[in-house]
Amino acid sequence: MSATQYLRYEPSVEQVRPEETKAVAEIIASIKRTSEFTCDRDKGHGTRQQHAKGVGFLRGELTVYDGLPDHLRQGLFEKAGVYPIIVRLSTAFDKSDRVRSPRGFAIKVLGVTGPKATDDDASTNQDLLLVNHKSYFADAMAYWSAQRNAERNVGMPDFVFRFGGFVARNLVALSDSTGIHIPILLRAIGDPGNNILGETFHTEGALRFGDYVARLRAVPMSEALRRLTGQPCHDGDDVVLKSVVAYFKDNSAEYELQAQLCTDLKRTPIEDASIDWPEDVSPPQALGKITLPRQAADSPARRDYANEVLSFDPWRSLAAHRPLGSIMRVRRDAYRMSRTLRQQQNKDKFPPPKEPREIADLPD
């Protein structure tokens, strides 16, 4: 496609609805209540409210391809080069892996310079948060509805979640075969529970992409990873972590980082994150390669650092990749509040948070 077919970024691509401010305030208050509940339940230990269960902690590199066309040479991808990265793999629910839940792939790119998306970001890092679902809740109002359900069910036993997942997976299969729409929440709790390393991961919401707007994704590239795509991985309490550790003991991994560029606000919307961007309208285009070498993907020191000291935030970002749309604006306020509260809860147990400056900051 020609670059002239892509929508040029300008501030007016975002359209904030009047009810969003109230919805964000309600979401933040609910997250605070659930965080306090889980901290009490876990004997004073504060945990993430999203993707709390870390299942792999990795060092690697992001190689930005040489020779990218001008419309892809934006922000982080303006010049060919190699950046060190820290990757935290996760599952959405802090429960037994028999309770199947979305898989997360959080990337911290180190040594990135340039104007930042927020004035209080003094780091030289770019965070990219990806999940194995293309789309997300539509906007702040839809997220508030889901957060209310999450708060009501925060103390629900695992067997209830497992039954709900079974029902949801059947509804997802019915939807896929008939085209009948089902809520995004059902697709999330109906995750099939496949091997995390074979999944394709998506930013779900939109990001500024320099002069354009994009969604990013990481796609398994190496043959060993592709063999894991679609393979079940949910038959034990900690089977996801064990599978990651076993894989990286003997294998490296490569993913390709790709971009879908926004073409128009109807077919590739910014304010409604629940709508997939069709690949025939916006085909994925390669930006670079993520390389994760053989390594010990878990250790007590590495786990504590990645789970308790590190934080990942889509707004820890270059201005050239500023998150866009309602669901990303929710994340700006919710992640900050959740991170601050968790740090207060754990101040006597773990070192104060500090952004890594070099790859060696992730312990062996």
Image (cartoon, grey):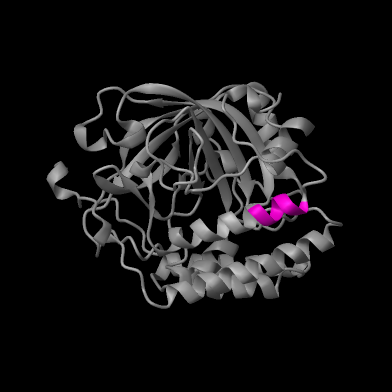
Camera-side residue: 318 or 253? 318
Answer yes or no: is residue 279 visible.
yes
Secondary structure predominantly adopted by residues drawn in magenta: helix
Q: Quadrant of residue 50?
A: bottom right
x 61%, y 75%: residue: 148
In the rendered view, tell whether residue 163 sits above or below residue 107: below
Magenta extent:
340-345
User: In the image, is residue 343 part of the stretch drawn in magenta?
Assistant: yes
Q: Is residue 310 magenta?
A: no
Task: Work out whether residue 339 or residue 262 is closer to the camera in this orientation and state it.
Answer: 339
* Residue 149 as seen in the image, left or right of residue 183: right
Quadrant in the picture for the N terminus: top left
Residue 127 to residue 157: above or below: above
Residue 243 in the figure: left or right of residue 27: right
- Residue 260 x %, y %: 31, 46
Q: Is residue 149 above or below residue 38?
A: below
Residue 185: percent from left, percent from top: 54, 68
Q: Name the residue nearer the viewer: 94 or 320.
A: 320
Residue 350 placed where, x, y %?
78, 41
Can you say whether 210 is above or below 184 in the image? above
Q: Residue at x 65, y 28 (%)?
A: 362
Tell me which residue sits at (59%, 35%) in the image.
355
Residue 47 shows up from this direction: no
